[in-house]
Amino acid sequence: MANVGDLFYDDLYPVNQDAETADPNTRAFLLEVVKILLDFISKTNDRNEKVLEFHHPIEMKKKLDLALKEDPEPVSQLLEDCKQALENQVKTGHPRFINQLSNGLDIVSMAGEWLTATANTNMFTYEIAPVFILMEHECLGKMRDIIGFQKGDSILAPGGSINNMYALMIARHKLYPQHKKHGMRAIKGQLIMYTSRHHHYSVSGGAAAIGLGTENCVQVPCDDKGRMIPVELERLITRHKSEGHLPFFVNCTTGTTVYGAFDPINSIADICEKHHIWLHIDAAWGGGLLMSRKYRESKFKGIERADSVTWNPHKLMGTLLQCSTLHVRESGLLISCNQMSADYLFQTDKVYDVCYDTGDKVIQCGRHNDIFKFWLQWRSRGMSGFERQIERLMELTAYQVRRMKEEGEKFYLLNDEPECTNVIFWYVPERLRPRQCPQYETRDWQLELGTVTAKLKGKMMSEGSLMVSYQPLGMLPNFFRSIISNQAVGEVDIDFMLEEMERLGKDL
Ligand SMILES: O=C(O)c1cc(=O)cc(C(=O)O)o1
């Protein structure tokens, strides 16, 4: 066989169909790619390696060779391209990448994603994805059991934002089915939906997407922990009904994006029941806590009363991106809402039971296989392993709060009782600590910390040693939000985060 680097794409399967050469060529190429992936995995888990090599976009463009040329590149160049891509990628599985809700690199789930790519099938029919469709049934059925839906139906979509929008569409279809054929004019009155002020922006985005208009996505006031205030919700619903509007949907967030706050499910469910309003629970982030009996009991009382639930395994459970699920209490609504019965796909006279076909339940037709990597990961842990994993993340969160309190004035906790693994805080440089700062805890002091926060994040990225997300929210200027969802994180990384922030930030 020629040197693998001298091969071209047409020396490999599927272009080359001469198995005698194609098979060894393809294996040799793929084995070289796997070596590159394995090196990246080792570096991702090596604390001596940087989280990232940051370059501004213009610099990065100059550094990379991304040109698409007239002639094919040899395998040697393709392998260099693979190395270049990973060398310049942020290691989101690194134990010091605590920047996003989805952090980490779960190896079993990743192996599942490798197989998924190799199987390369579409999930719209059982016909071409029999095993994976049955795995969806197994996983989604267990998730509905955990939620407490007796029957119901579920789907996977390309993220929590799409699933939140599906919930809106299904709610509207349930309450106003004439809309599907006749459009909004068939609904006599203005539909109004409700969510907390700390909601994920996809909920108001869904209002725009389905034609309600964001002005009809009413944001309900929250308490100081970021939780929706039920009495405010009922006050708004009552007022809108007296104005002749049609309140039809409430989004209850369990695990808000920034604070990690949990809206009070039962109180909100009581209001929805009283006013015959659809209750959706956006558990995209917090849903992972359902895998722990302790947290299922303490944080999700009443979830079984919901009409729909969004739950993203790719967040707190560490399944690889993307894996986002929607669960609907009432069977048949998904398909009734979205069915278009495309004859070329969803023939009703198939040799098998067509209820196993899924494409007509969603608006997207082609659907990626997001289940195998989740099923394999779940298979590797069982419920007991996932329960231990989730409870460990919450233990580490408690450790982080304890350590920040021990560090005294260096860290200003905005919430010292986090409900999820979100810890929100300011790092306080020496000049802004109480003894040196007469304006301590004034508005100007907060604004100054907002500026320090952005600068400190910039220093972290330039150093490449740590990544912690920040954002303003409401009246609060920038503040840090650390997220522990990566199974690689240990107490040593939390200690490092505090020390590194002090090292990089004390003179800011
Ligand atoms: O899937 C994620 O990692 C994700 C989704 C969000 O909407 C928001 C965030 C985030 O704020 O980190 O992360």
Image (cartoon, grey):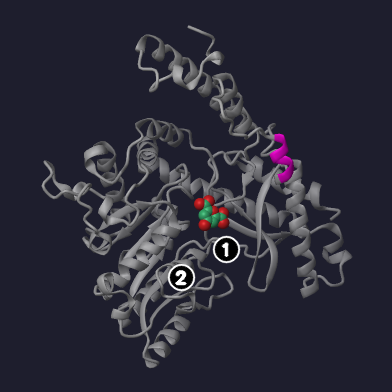
Q: Is residue 159 above or below residue 41?
A: below
- Residue at 35% from the left image edge and 47% from the top image edge: 367
- Residue at 38% from the left image edge and 43% from the top image edge: 370
Position of residue 145 measured from the top left corner of the image (x, y, whole percent)? 28, 54
Residue sitting nearer the eye, 488 or 220? 220
- Disc 2 from disc 1: Cα separation: 25 Å
Residue sitting nearer the eye, 508 or 491? 508
Q: Which residues are magenta?
A: 58-63
Query: What amino acid is labelled 2 in the image?
Result: Ala
Horizontal side of 134 relative to 3 (left or right) equals left
Position of residue 148 measured from the top left corner of the image (x, y, whole percent)? 29, 59
> Which residue is label 2 attached to?
208
Query: What amino acid is labelled 1 in the image?
Result: Tyr
Local SS, label 2: helix
Camera-near label (2 vs 1) is: 2
Earlier sequence position, callout 2 versus callout 1: 2
Q: Is residue 421 visible?
A: no
> Which residue is label 1 attached to?
259
Which residue is most to the top? 1
Whether label 2 lies within 8 Å of ligand 1 gets the answer no
Which residue is most to the front? 70
* Magenta residue check for 407: no
Q: Is residue 198 above or below residue 291?
A: below
Position of residue 401 measured from the top left corner of the image (x, y, whole percent)? 64, 55
- Residue at 70% from the left image edge and 31% from the top image edge: 48
